[in-house]
Amino acid sequence: MDCITQASFMRGFMDLCDLSFNKGWNERNGGNVSYRIKPEEIREVTAFLNEEAPSQTIGITAENLAGEYFLVTGSTKFFMNVKSNPFDNTCIIKIDEKGENYKIVWGLQKGGRPTSELPTHLLNHSVKKHCTNGAHRVIMHAHPANIIALTFILPLDGKVFTQEIWQMMTECPIVFPAGIGVVEWMVPGGPEVAKATAELIQKQDVVIWAHHGIFCSGEDFDLTFGLMDTVEKAAEILVKVISCGGKRQSIGAKEILSLAEPYSVPIDAEMFS
Ligand code: 13P
Ligand code: ZN
């Protein structure tokens, strides 16, 4: 391999950032993405890594991430530049043996640090690695306009958001059968918001940050992007419905729950309790 960007995980990550930017979800440096790199993928790129880099504290402890490598977007870096210049706008970090510190082993060639939301990304990865038996590898944060708009209109309650958004498209309860979690407005970037998000992401793959944006977790780049796209599209429909004077008819709880059996998805009935 002549260049690290030939690695398929690098290409997938760059494409994801580009798609997200083109959706209008990442104004300026808004949003961030992290990917837990597979051992066989990191072996392919070892020649490009500097394992002697200095260590820095994460701000949270994630013991089950010890020794893992992540590809992440850089703080203050613009999504629109990731695809054309991943060297200056992304980095690969390695977590130490305690799960408390990281070092930048590749990237951010003009300087900088990983996303300011690193505590939330890594705590979410830690929880998802545990509860999906390692299947989930992607955490994506963005600022989609319709989801943010709804946090000014609906009560900041996960059950209300789930019920309202599930009703907007029949596919929604099939795509995210555990529903949506909502975190009230908090100062971003720190360990408190990381813990509040991680608590919800144990059960759900979608967590909305009130008046800020959304986090999605998934197995790969396509599934994570597709999840965010589905939630944002349903949110757009809801904004339109509300703007047109509100619902005159809709899909009921019983109908939504009746999708579980034919589609073999565990739709969480608790969301209607
Ligand atoms: P970063 O530029 O540090 O990734 O922050 C962007 C953001 O969306 C913060 O929530
Ligand atoms: Zn943000």
Image: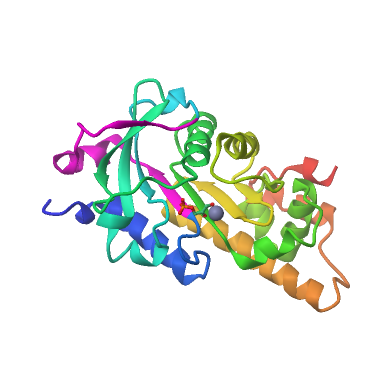
**Ligand 2 quadrant?**
bottom right
Residue 258 visible in image: no
Q: Image check: 137 left or right of 269?
A: left
The magenta segment is 32-59
Q: Residue at x 36, y 55 (%)?
A: 13
Instruction: Determine whether 92 is above or below 236 in the image.
Output: above
Q: Position of residue 102 (x, y in %)?
A: 35, 32
In the image, is 55 to the left or to the right of 213? left
Which quadrant would residue 230 be assigned to in this image? bottom right
Give the image location of residue 236, x and y in percent.
Answer: 67, 70
Residue 146 occupies quadrant: bottom right
- Vertical comparison of 156 with 38: above or below: below
Residue 113 appears left or right of 50:
right
Q: Residue furthest bottom?
A: 244
Question: Which residue corresponds to the image point at 67% horizontal and 44% vertical from the top-left?
Answer: 178
Pick the quarter of the image with the C terminus: top right
Asked if residue 211 can be seen in this view, the reply is yes
Q: Residue furthest right?
A: 248
